[in-house]
Image (cartoon, rainbow, N blue to C red):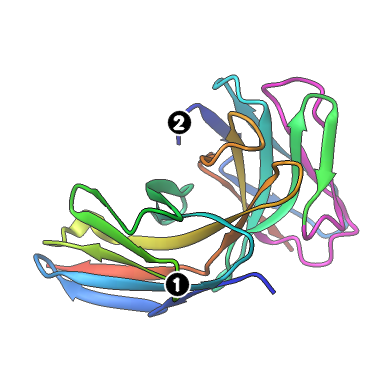
Amino acid sequence: KNQVEQSPQSLIILEGKNCTLQCNYTVSPFSNLRWYKQDTGRGPVSLTIMTFSENTKSNGRYTATLDADTKQSSLHITASQLSDSASYICVVSAMFSGGYNKLIFGAGTRLAVHP
Amino acid sequence: DGGITQSPKYLFRKEGQNVTLSCEQNLNHDAMYWYRQDPGQGLRLIYYSQIVNDFQKGDIAEGYSVSREKKESFPLTVTSAQKNPTAFYLCASSLDPNSYEQYFGPGTRLTVT
């Protein structure tokens, strides 16, 4: 069964601190993995996207890693800001016959950054 | 949110009534999608459309219907057959069905009492 599991479910950190969010997946055939940021009551916005051959990608203070062998990804946030408070969703894409790209979503990690 | 708009942002309905959620995009994307988001769960695909006048059921299509008469519009109707319709509904689009990137709208929160 195609699944994406994220941990922790929620996290509270102080402003300026770093944190790492985890994503484990069992998706086949794997196409790519992306991290989205979703503010409360808003649509998700893409942070990074990685294909099978990429093992790290950065977007400002966000750095994503991918280990395709262990089927794990992490999102590291450096020097957190209050505006980082949001849900972070790991999404794995499976490419099926006919070229259809199906997305499997994790439940997300809810991050709260406190002053 | 890119060039995708959803309206209204909040919607309230009585049980037994059908309701239609609007989704419009000006990105000239071929593919459009409807997802449902519930607390503690990942987004689940309701319906998707790869091209005008064509659409396919997703993982949880029961109790929902869609149409794709125009490239830029993909309305979702939540019918009275949907047993638990209260949820946050997200519309997305991509350049084509093979595209890596899906762009999401701001969402509509539907409450049925």
Q: Nearer the viewer, residue B19 or B43?
A: B43
Report the span colored magenta.
B59-87
Majority secondary structure of magenta residues: loop
Give the residue displayed 63% in from the left and 37% down from the top: B98
Of labels 2 and 1, the one closer to you:
1
Above or below, B58 relative to B65: below
Q: Nearer the viewer, residue A91 or A16?
A: A91
Q: CA distance from mark 2 to mark 1?
A: 34 Å
Task: List the residue tagged with mark 1.
Answer: A69
Above or below, A39 relative to B40: above
| SS type, badge 1 | loop
The x and y percentages for residue A78 are 15, 62
Give the residue displayed 87% in from the left and 58% down from the top: B62
| SS type, badge 2 | loop
Task: List the residue tagged with mark 2.
Answer: B2
> Left or right: where does residue B32 sit relative to residue B41?
right
| Quarter of the rendering occupied by the C terminus of chain A | bottom left
> Left or right: where does residue A17 sit relative to residue B109?
left
The x and y percentages for residue A36 are 42, 53
| Number of the label disc, if any, that sits on residue B18 | none
Chain identity of mark 1: A
- Examine the image and state in which quarter residue B27 appears: top right
Q: Amino acid at mark 2?
A: Gly
Crowding at mark 1 (Cα within 10 Å: few <14, some 14-19, many 20+): few
**Marks 2 and 1 close (CB-CB < 8 Å):** no
Q: Nearer the viewer, residue B9 or A79?
A: A79
